[in-house]
Image (cartoon, rainbow, N blue to C red):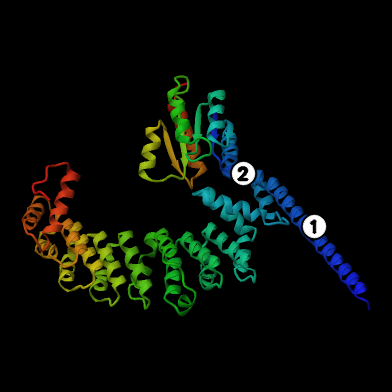
Amino acid sequence: MSSIVVVDDDSDIRGLLEFKLSAAGHTVTAEADGEAGLAAIMDVHPDVVVLDWMMPRMSGIEVCLELRKDPSMADIPVLFLTAKAQESDVQRGFAAGGNDYVIKPFSPRELSSRIDALLARTPR
Amino acid sequence: MSTEAILLIAATLNLVLIIGLSLSTALLKARRERRAKRHEEELALLRPVMMRYLATWEDGDAHDLADMLIGYRGVTTSFEELVAGLLPKLRGADRSVLVDILRRRGTIDEARLNTSSRVAVRRYRAVELLGAAGVSEGIPEAAKLLADHSTDVRLAAVRALGRIGTGEAGAALLEHLDSEEGQKYPLPPHPVTMALLRIGADATQALTRALDAEQVEVRTIAAEVLGVLGVYPAVSELQIRMRVDPSVSVRLGATHALGRLSMPSSVDDLTAMLRTEEDVEVLAAACNALGRIIDPASMPELEQAVAHPHPTVRVAAAMALVPFGETGLDRLREIAQRDAAGGDAAREVLARNSIATNTTPLISL
């Protein structure tokens, strides 16, 4: 069983992922803005983070950059889940330290598979 | 009756009226609040069921949740609101599952019926739902609402057809624009163009047919969208439109499209345009198109266009010579020596090219 932090200001997406990932056997913590998300990540030290990009108070990119600065959290895999679909956005997401990038509208099934793949690649 | 008595009666009537109005306002407010509270309660009940169903439907043991969603009959529009909010966020099988629930509980059929409602808000919501669900059975209703007297409903119908995204939806949109009703209830070109782009390759046949439409606006949109979508089989029809269409905007749209498609078979028509066309924008677009195709056969015509009386055409022609590489730059350097007849445009474009490529200008301004 792995722990996952989901940070998204869309309550539907947060709710859906909480149910979906919990049903897959993971422990899920969900937050609605970047600042609260970063605090939750520091608190939980999850196995994977699912991050929206455009959020109030702190963007997903900023959260990811903060994580990569901190040696204790630099290795946590980050999956961006965002509506920003331009090629340059995807590049920016990976440049900020993202490990995977999923564009909204999205398939929760595909997202779940990608999280499993990230978990499988990450040494624990 | 004395004046005092009349004033007293009037004051009493006023007071009664004020109390009556205050009471009815308070009652209306309380009713709205009760409804909003009920709406929130229904959403709080439905949301977890919906999320749980979406999270577990694959496991095959979520039939009871499906039945609960299909059988749910709320007092407010909470179910439709929840689904309309979720649909645009999902794709793939999870989205299809949600649309299936809508079908089975009769929401799609109800939305189709509501497109004929007397209340504009209901028609708007109904067509938005049909679009969000992307169901092709909603095409006739959405197409009918393109002629709705409410602009908001008409625009929602355009978006819905774009989201439904089939060739039939594209055809319905273009046919409406070219009809008498389309003239009576006009639609702004931008949302129509966006809807057609969203439909994409499936709209190709309808767009190609629309190049022969009666209305200038329809032919223009069709030409531009065919270019953006990169529909190569439409090249010959676009060439015809560029050559013979009486409307400048259609010729311009077709020229833009041929530039985007950049097929060498367009070179003869484009160079012929440089000799015969009178509109400055179309001429500049033809130069741009030739600059994209980069066929050496078009260089003499472009060199002549650098000497065109209008500066827009001169600069467009000079810029079109840059992609030809050293050959084109050499021609520009020769032209730049002239005091008139395009020397100004050639010098500007050479200077711009030097800045862009970080090289020393070979000719001074």
Q: Earlier in the sequence, mark 1 or mark 2?
A: 1
Q: Quadrant of the N terminus of chain A?
A: top right
What residue would you read off at disc 2? B51
Quadrant of res A26:
top right
Kindly identify which residue carries mark 1: B26
What's under tag 2, amino acid-wise? Met
Residue B308 shown left or right of residue A56 in the figure: left
Q: Position of residue A65 (x, y in %)?
A: 43, 29
Element under label 1? helix
The vertical placement of A5 against B120, above or below, is: above
Q: Are marks 1 and 2 in contact (CB under 8 Å)?
A: no
Number of residues whose C-alpha sits closer than 10 Å to that of mark 1, classed few (under 14), some (14–19) or many (20 or more) = few
- Chain of the residue displaying label 2: B
Q: Residue at x 52, y 48 (%)?
A: B89
Q: Amino acid at mark 1?
A: Ala
x, y percent for residue B267: 16, 65
The image shows residue B340 at horizontal and vertical percentages of 9, 62
Measured from the top left, where is residue B347 in percent x and y?
Answer: 13, 54
Mark 1 to mark 2 CA distance (whole Å): 37 Å
